[in-house]
Image (spheres, rainbow, N blue to C red):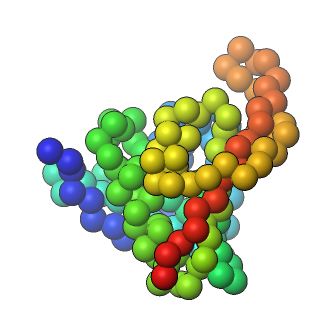
Amino acid sequence: MKPRLTFSPIELKDLAQIMQIEQQIYPNPWSTKVTYDCIQAGYQCIKGECSEHPGEISCYALMMIGFEESNLLNIGVNPKFQRQSLATQMMNRLLLISRINHAKHMWLEVRESNQAAINLYTKLEFKTIGVRKNYYKYTDANDKKIKEHAILMSKKIRA
């Protein structure tokens, strides 16, 4: 049975928990400052909590709404809750928010090695429209400099 999510805006008090998740799931996690700036800028910053685990962030996303478009900036699922359709539920929420805000397309970049995310976006009918060369640059756990391409994807949002 899929966990039921309750969605609400990310608050400043949530930053520590979100940063902890970021550290666990990404090789180059966002900084607290970047996430804070997204909240302060009024972007769509949403968290999801499972009813069985109140107070614990199960997933989160940050999205920018522009003129007739939305841009997924970041999405994450707490490792404890992965493989339970939470990313799909969050993406469907973001697509709804995009539609309500009259976006005609949603855009996103995804690390070329993140096959699970690429599979999710493909299942949700996102199309690959390009590649951003060496978009992700970071140092791995072995102190090796990594450059990785981003796949640029888009989905037409139905009115």
Image coordinates for residue 117, horizontal then vertical, percent: 52, 41
Residue placed at 59% from the left, 79% from the top? 103
Task: Establish if 39 lies above or below 4.
Answer: below
Task: Establish if 126 lies above or below 29.
Answer: below
Image coordinates for residue 46, horizontal then vertical, percent: 45, 66
In this picture, residue 56 sits left or right of residue 64: left
Image coordinates for residue 65, horizontal then vertical, percent: 62, 76
Residue placed at 64% from the left, 30% from the top? 113
Q: Nearer the viewer, residue 118 or 2?
A: 118
Residue placed at 47% from the left, 68% from the top? 95
Residue placed at 33% from the left, 37% from the top? 83
Task: Establish if 47 lies above or below 24.
Answer: below
For this orientation, the residue located farthest to the top is: 142
Numbered circles on residues, count? 0
Q: Is residue 85 visible?
A: yes
In this picture, residue 41 sits left or right of residue 23: right
Q: Nearer the viewer, residue 129 or 150?
A: 129
Image coordinates for residue 40, horizontal then vertical, percent: 62, 75
Q: Nearer the viewer, residue 125 or 48?
A: 125
In this picture, residue 104 sits left or right of residue 145: left
